[in-house]
């Protein structure tokens, strides 16, 4: 398979007469880097989350700035990462070029775990069998730092495998652990272990020996987790998510044979280990510029630091992968009937009705249940109900109240100002396209 599995936009030089593009700085040891600017599609500061449709500002958006980042001086690591990327692509077809870059950087980051504050999970998930999940795990096993491969292991066995010098956990067939509510409940301790191990200095306490002496066990270790279907939300939130798919007709990969192919993988693993060995202290002190924030930034930071240490095209490739893959997961979460989807849809309804101060519950439900591309009509026999809507919104601290309608009477509904904080936090850049308008909205 060709190393380039997806096309990349060609850099476009600034137009004549405009200021040259300002590149976000690549992190340097001891020098904190500025975060990339992100464009807000919605002004939340003055009007309780009103959606605007003005023309886009002249300044480039964050992804465009990343695309135009110049390559930096390449080190030995840049060539090693390119070799590792080609080997992964030889045996597995990843869903995008960004996913291939992310997997490559994640492998290299396992060799510097002692420098990280956060241990990113790699969630390798797919909708069905034969999507290449286990094959990717096979390749990762031969290239990561001190692999510990587990299939349906007990939490006790796993955390006893983690020492002060972290190994790399590789958990296959995670759907046998978390694949149903009953399984997930039974394996709640494993979920807690995977969550705790995302951050340094989170221990589990157990009693050991005949005298039941309390003992702390380490949990911090990078982990790749493969399975059919999504992992628990709290694990996905701490993961770089690679959504595998079945190979299409004409897509070819080389068959993987452990005894024949592992020596080449071990060779690149050992060379990456030698390259990263003297970089532990520089990696510890780097503060790279990041195109995302909060937990996503914590999770992706080790990969971006590895890219900055390698140089060449990798600082740009790492940030492209980070921004695009995080945005894709945010979109997936928005489309989920749970989570922020209800907030985003209600926001569009308010916008379609010229931002009234309030909308009645009946009007909201009529529009939500009438949208053929939304999940709400399937929420029950009669679609989403007032009680169901209220339960979802209470999770965000939003409750119904009296709103005044056009004829001067009052009815139960929701006022726009109550959504302002939730919109700002959970769907700050929602697209203004709305479900079909409902008619006249209510007044506050």
Image: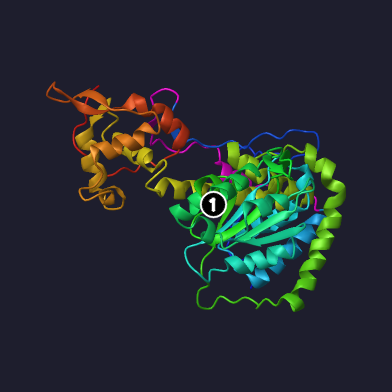
Residue 16 visible: no
Whether 261 is drawn above or below 61: the answer is: below
Residue 78 visible: yes
Whole-percent x, y for residue 147 in the image: 73, 59
State left or right for residue 15 relative to residue 157. left
Whether 289 is drawn above or below 81: the answer is: above
Give the camera-side residue of 389 and 57: 389
State left or right for residue 414 relative to residue 278. left
**On the image, which quarter does residue 428 sit in?**
top left
Badge 1: residue crowd in 10 Å (few <14, some 14–19, many ≥20): some
**On the image, which quarter does residue 299 sit in?**
top right
Based on the picture, tell me whether residue 46 belongs to the magenta stretch.
yes
Based on the picture, tell me whether residue 62 belongs to the magenta stretch.
yes
Whole-percent x, y for residue 57 in the image: 49, 36
The residue drawn where x is 37% and y is 47% is 337
State left or right for residue 334 relative to residue 350. right
The residue drawn where x is 55% and y is 63% is 95
In the rendered image, the residue lying farthest to the left is: 407
- By secondary structure, the bulk of the magenta-drawn segment is best described as loop
The residue drawn where x is 76% and y is 47% is 113
Q: Which residues are magenta?
A: 45-74
Q: Which corner quadrant holds the C terminus?
A: top left
In the rendered image, the residue lying farthest to the front is: 210
Residue matched to label 1: 187
């Amino acid at each position: 398979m060709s190393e380039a599995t997806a096309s990349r936009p060609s850099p476009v030089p600034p137009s004549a007469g405009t200021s040259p593009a300002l590149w976000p700085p690549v992190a340097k040891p001891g020098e904190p880097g500025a975060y990339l600017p992100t464009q807000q599609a919605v002004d939340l500061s003055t009007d309780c989350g009103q959606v605007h449709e003005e023309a886009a500002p002249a300044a480039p958006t964050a992804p465009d700035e990343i695309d135009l980042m110049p390559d930096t001086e390449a080190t030995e690591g840049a060539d090693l990462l390119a070799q590792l990327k080609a080997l992964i692509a030889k045996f597995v077809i990843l869903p995008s070029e960004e996913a291939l870059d992310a997997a490559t950087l994640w492998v290299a980051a396992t060799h510097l775990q002692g420098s990280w504050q956060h241990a990113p999970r790699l969630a390798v998930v797919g909708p069905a069998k034969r999507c290449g999940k286990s094959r990717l795990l096979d390749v990762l096993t031969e290239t990561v730092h001190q692999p510990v491969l587990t299939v349906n292991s007990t939490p006790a066995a796993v955390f006893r495998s983690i020492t002060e010098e972290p190994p790399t956990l590789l958990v296959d067939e995670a759907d046998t652990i978390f694949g149903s509510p009953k399984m997930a409940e039974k394996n709640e301790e494993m979920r807690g272990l995977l969550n705790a191990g995302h951050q340094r200095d989170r221990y589990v306490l157990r009693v050991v020996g005949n005298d039941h002496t309390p003992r702390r066990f380490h949990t911090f270790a990078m982990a790749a987790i493969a399975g059919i279907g999504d992992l628990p939300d709290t694990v996905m939130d701490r993961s770089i998510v690679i959504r595998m798919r079945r190979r299409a007709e004409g897509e070819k990969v080389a068959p993987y044979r452990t005894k024949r192919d592992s020596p080449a993988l071990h060779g690149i693993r050992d060379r990456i280990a030698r390259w990263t060995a003297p970089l532990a202290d520089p990696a510890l002190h780097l503060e790279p510029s990041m195109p995302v924030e909060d937990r996503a930034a914590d999770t992706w930071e080790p990969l971006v630091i590895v890219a900055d240490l390698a140089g060449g095209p990798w600082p740009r490739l790492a940030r492209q992968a980070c921004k695009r893959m995080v945005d894709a997961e945010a979109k997936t979460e928005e489309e989920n009937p749970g989570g922020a989807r209800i907030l985003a849809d209600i926001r569009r309804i308010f916008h379609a009705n010229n931002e009234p101060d309030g909308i009645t519950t009946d009007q909201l439900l009529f529009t939500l249940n009438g949208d053929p591309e939304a999940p709400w009509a399937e929420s029950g026999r009669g679609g989403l109900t007032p009680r169901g809507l209220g339960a979802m919104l209470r999770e965000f601290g939003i409750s119904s109240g009296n709103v005044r309608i056009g004829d001067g009477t009052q009815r139960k509904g929701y006022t726009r100002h109550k959504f302002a904080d939730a919109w700002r936090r959970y769907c700050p850049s929602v697209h203004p396209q709305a479900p079909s308008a409902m008619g006249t909205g209510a007044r506050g």
